[in-house]
Each structure stands twice: as C-alpha cells, then as structure tokens.
Image (cartoon, grey):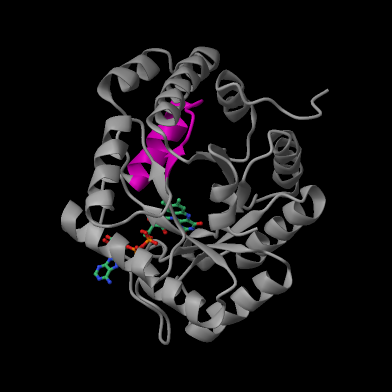
Amino acid sequence: MRLSEIYAQRPFCFSFEVYPPKTDAAAVSMRQHVEKLVKYQPGFISCTYGAGGTTQGQTLDICSDILATYKVPVMAHLTCVGSPVPMLLEWLAQARTRGITNIMALRGDPPKGHESFTAVEGGLSYANELVALIKQHEPGFGIGVGGYPEVHQEAPSAEADLINLKRKVDAGADAIINQLFYENADFYRFHEKCLKAGITIPNIPGILPITNFAQIKRITSLCKARIPQGLSEELEKHQADPEATAKIGIEHAIKQCEDLRESGVPSIHFYVLNQSDATMRVLEQLGIRAVNAA
Ligand SMILES: Cc1cc2nc3c(=O)[nH]c(=O)nc-3n(C[C@H](O)[C@H](O)[C@H](O)COP(=O)(O)OP(=O)(O)OC[C@H]3O[C@@H](n4cnc5c(N)ncnc54)[C@H](O)[C@@H]3O)c2cc1C
C-alpha cells in the first residue's frame, strides 16, 4: 500500500521507524520489538538507510522481512550518498521486485570526514532530484521526504529551506515525514508556513520518546533539534536514574502526542530506535491498543 492510500485509510494513523542493527544479537532484539509493535497495527514501518550509504542491502532485507512476516506496509529509506544514478535505479528496481511500495527519498548527510555534501560523479545533489528520478523511472512507489520544523542545519534561512521543501513536493512527494522535535509550537509554526507556501500533502510530526539523557543529547546535537530548557533541566537532574529519566521522557512524549492529535495531524511517526516499550506506553496512553495481545 502506498503512503497516500495509508493516510487516506484512517482519520488518525501512526508509523514506526527502525534502523539496520549492527550485530546478530541486535537483529534478534529488533525483531522481538517489531513483533510487539506490529500488534498496534501501524500504517507502515520504515527502515533507515545507513549514513554514508552503508547498509543498503540491509534496509531492503529488513523491509522485505517485515512485509513478508507481518503483512504491514513498509517504506525503505534511500539516500543519494555514494550512489551514481544507475546504482540508485538498480536499488529501486530491487525494492520494487521485493514488493516494497514506499521510498523515503533523502539526500543524506555528508559522509564521515566531509564538511559538506558533494554529489558523487553521476549522482544527485538534492533530495528533490531523487524524487524526480523515482517519479520518472519507478512511478509505482509512494514517496516520503524529510521536513525540518526547526530548519535544516545547512539551510541559509527558514524561507530557503521551505522553498527547497516545496521543490520536493512539486517533484512528486506524497508525504513529509519530519525530523524529531520536542516543542510542538515549532511544528505548528512550520506547518502554517507550509500551508501558506501551498504545501498541502500530509505533514507528519516525528516523535522520539526520550529514555536516556546521554543518548538524546547525542542525537539532538547531530540533527540540531532543541530540547526545551525545562525538560532538559529535569532530565539532567535525574540522569543517573534510568527509570525517572524514562518517566519524564515518556510523559513529555505523551503530552506532545495528545496535543498533536487534538490539533488534527493525520499521523505521528515514531522513531523507536529498535525498541518498543516507550512507544507502546505512549500509544496505550493515546487509547491505541495492541490487537491479539497476550
Ligand atoms: C524522517 C527522516 C528520516 C531520515 N532518514 C535518514 C536515513 O535513513 N539515512 C540517512 O543517511 N539520513 C536520514 N535522514 C537525515 C537526512 O539525510 C539529512 O537531514 C540530510 O542532511 C538532508 O536530507 P534531505 O533529504 O532533507 O535533503 P534535501 O532536501 O536535499 O536538503 C538538504 C539541504 O539542501 C538544501 N536544498 C535542498 N534542495 C536544494 C536546492 N535544489 N538548491 C539549494 N539548496 C537545496 C535544503 O534546504 C537543506 O539545507 C533522515 C531525515 C529525516 C527528517
């Protein structure tokens, strides 16, 4: 099922994002968590594409496995990093052959050791070009693109970033999946600007429930998301107590999600980090129950 059909199917949807595990033990653990999460009947599960263009094969394997095992729609992430156009097309053909119906089309971050992003020879420079490539050669896919409520870190201004987002939408994206954020007001402001710019495709907030302060500091410093001062202070105070940290983080995520749902967002995309407990607690609090739970 394609993204547009998934979002049209229910008034309120949600999705999960996993990443390719690095070890066999981590793969087993991820599978166990996915097994719990699929019982909540997500609209889709997406799997990231390794930074620097690594794990391409794993992304496809994980998506095919989830699709075959649980019959849940999937979205495979793809970046422009390190791949000339023929390689991108080959990967897309493999995704199609495996029954994957949605692609998250991204430029990707500069590879390790590089200050800025440079396209490989015969490759693409921006995500809007990847969207156009998919539309031209593989028009059967639903296409997601990245959105940045706090503005992409390389963009010279919020306005320039919005123009670039519009390029991706005009090239044929079906939905915007947003970078994680912890202040809903940032998302609402961004969404208003999108509407004013004529961007009307589903604009999906991204939520990562905090369970570990050191980990979230690392993640937010990489993607330049802001943790509100009050929340950051609370987390810092309790950082030596994992249970208290998770309680604070999950309660914040619940408040964010309740408010987002009330505001009428069509869906919420959860960065589950290959875990399930925190996201399940948020879903339960939203009144979303597992089907066939023991
Ligand atoms: C939901 C989500 C999932 C992600 N998953 C992955 C993943 O699986 N693997 C991974 O490696 N990374 C992933 N990322 C991170 C992403 O690759 C980085 O944020 C990357 O730096 C930008 O990718 P993009 O597709 O948004 O780029 P683009 O939309 O191409 O934008 C990149 C920058 O260039 C500017 N720009 C865009 N188009 C133009 C243009 N035509 N002319 C001039 N400037 C332009 C933009 O304003 C922005 O500053 C994800 C991000 C999000 C939000």
Q: Residue at x 67, y 64 (%)?
A: 100
User: 166 and 264: which one is in front?
Assistant: 264
Residue 261 left/right relative to 47: left
Identify whether 213 is placed above or below 196: above
Residue 189 left/right relative to 123: left
Quadrant occupied by the C terminus: top right
Would you say residue 222 sits in the magenta stretch?
A: yes
User: 31 and 131: which one is in front?
Assistant: 131
Q: Position of residue 41 (x, y in %)?
A: 69, 38
Identify whether 254 is placed above or below 149: above
Identify whether 281 is placed above or below 3: above
Residue 83 visible? The answer is: no
Tell which quarter ligand 1 is in: bottom left
Q: Position of residue 120 (x, y in %)?
A: 41, 80
Q: Residue at x 35, y 71 (%)?
A: 126
The residue segment tinted magenta is: 204-223
Residue 169 left/right relative to 229: right
Count up the numbered dots: 0
User: 144 and 202: which one is in front?
Assistant: 202
Q: Position of residue 25 (x, y in %)?
A: 74, 43
Q: Residue at x 49, y 83 (%)?
A: 85
Identify whether 192 is placed above or below 255: below
Q: Position of residue 253 (x, y in %)?
A: 46, 25
Would you say residue 254 sits in the magenta stretch?
A: no
Residue 106 visible? The answer is: yes
Q: Residue at x 27, y 31 (%)?
A: 185
For residue 75, what is the image quadrant? bottom right
Quadrant occupied by the N terminus: bottom right
